């Protein structure tokens, strides 16, 4: 579709594609190479599912995105019903992930040489 610039400046532009307020949250996490990837995935998904504002559908998902000589890198992806609350939920999830990793003895840093 071609829209003349004058229509954009003087007219009202509406987005007919997206009528909801659903927002996506992505949280990258890097853990020690010694960590069990399945355990990390399980903890991240559990933390996301426990937050009352994280949507049940689509369900939270964890992607194993990279391996380096010292770290395993993951990304937690989940959705909230109101994009305006995404920042607060992301912060809450960071706090909860940090606390759970301490409890589960999952190290966020590479082992000391």
Image (cartoon, helix red, strand yellow):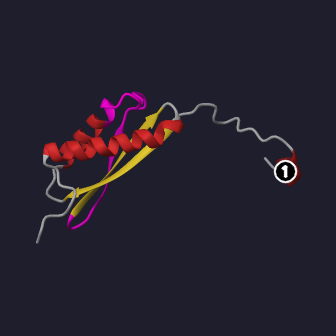
Residue 109 position in % (x across, y down): 20, 61
Q: Decide: is 87 above or below 71.
A: above
Residue 49 position in % (x across, y down): 32, 31
Where is residue 67, by image quadrant? bottom left
What are the residue bounds of the magenta stretch? 48-70
Q: Would you say residue 100 is visible in this rendering? A: yes
Magenta-drawn stretch contains 61: yes
Q: Would you say residue 38 is visible in this rendering? A: no
Residue 68 position in % (x across, y down): 25, 65
The residue positioned 25% from the left and 43% from the top of the image is: 41
Where is residue 89, by image quadrant? top left
- Considering every residue shown, the one lying at the far left of the view is 113
Residue that label 1 marks: 9
Image side of residue 87 versus residue 51, left or right: right
Q: Decide: is 17 above or below 40.
A: above
Residue 111 position in % (x across, y down): 13, 64
- Considering every residue shown, the one lying at the far bottom of the view is 113
Image side of residue 40 versus residue 29, left or right: left
């Amino acid at each position: 579709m071609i829209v003349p610039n004058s229509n954009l400046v003087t007219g009202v532009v509406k987005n007919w594609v997206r009528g909801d307020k659903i927002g996506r949250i992505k949280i990258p996490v890097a853990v020690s190479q010694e960590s069990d990837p399945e355990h990390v995935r399980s903890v991240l998904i559990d933390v996301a599912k426990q937050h009352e504002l994280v949507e049940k559908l689509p369900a939270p998902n964890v992607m194993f995105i990279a391996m380096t000589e010292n770290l395993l890198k993951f990304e937690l992806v989940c959705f909230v019903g109101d994009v305006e609350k995404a920042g607060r939920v992301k912060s809450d999830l960071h706090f909860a992930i940090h606390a759970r990793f301490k409890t589960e003895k999952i190290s966020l840093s590479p082992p000391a040489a």
